[in-house]
């Protein structure tokens, strides 16, 4: 009976759950040129929080991510607006963000 009730309720609840995505931003620094940034997103279905956290953990623990500095990895929850749940930075990401913001204001 309990399984039958769960099967009946799940399709009704799923459309109201949040979507998740893992965003990996790499920064390319070439002296004399503006800082380039490249974002790659991996999107997950509604309510797939466990799969998203597992993928985020794999990206963070990857040696490729650590050696490719400067890199910023975010786990985002998207319901009505996007919100960052977890974030990891490898290299001088905060310094590069401030440089790119300063260039845009001029």
Image: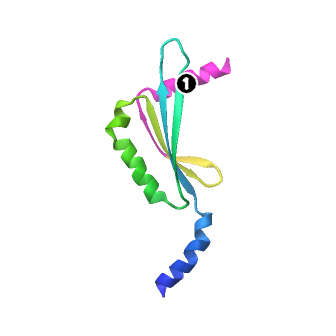
Quarter of image, res 17:
bottom right
Q: Determine whether the residue tagged by mark 1 lies in a helix, strand or loop.
A: helix
Percent position (x, y) of residue 89? 43, 35
Viewer-nearest residue: 45 or 96: 45
- The reply, left or right, for residue 42 in relation to residue 69 is right
Considering only vertical position in the picture, is 5 above or below 33?
below
Q: Which residue, given by chain and number where applicable, does mark 1 sit on?
A: 98
Q: What is the chief secondary structure element of the magenta stretch?
A: helix
Percent position (x, y) of residue 82? 60, 48
Kindly identify the residue that appears in the image at 56 percent across and 60 percent down: 46
Kindly identify the residue that appears in the image at 48 percent across and 84 percent down: 2
- The reply, left or right, for residue 80 in relation to residue 39 is right
Quarter of image, res 45:
bottom right
Q: In the displayed image of the protein, which residue is found farthest to the right?
A: 106
Kindly identify the residue that appears in the image at 53 percent across and 24 percent down: 36
Percent position (x, y) of residue 101? 60, 24
Q: In the displayed image of the protein, which residue is found farthest to the top?
A: 32
Magenta residues (range)? 86-106
Considering only vertical position in the picture, is 12 above or below 89?
below
Percent position (x, y) of residue 77? 55, 52
Q: In the displayed image of the protein, which residue is found farthest to the bottom?
A: 1
**Looking at the rendering, in which quadrant would you find the C terminus?**
top right
Q: Residues within 10 Å of mark 1 (few under 14, many from 20)?
A: few
Viewer-nearest residue: 54 or 93: 54
Considering only vertical position in the picture, is 57 above or below 12?
above
């Amino acid at each position: 009976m309990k399984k039958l009730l769960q099967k009946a309720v799940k399709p009704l609840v799923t459309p109201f759950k949040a979507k998740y995505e893992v965003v990996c931003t790499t920064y390319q620094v070439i002296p004399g040129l503006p800082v380039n940034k490249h974002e790659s997103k991996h999107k997950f279905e509604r309510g797939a929080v466990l799969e998203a956290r597992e993928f985020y953990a794999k990206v963070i623990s990857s040696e490729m991510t650590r050696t490719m500095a400067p890199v910023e990895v975010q786990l985002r929850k998207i319901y009505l607006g996007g919100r960052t749940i977890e974030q990891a930075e490898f290299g001088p990401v905060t310094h590069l963000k401030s440089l790119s913001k300063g260039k845009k204001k001029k």
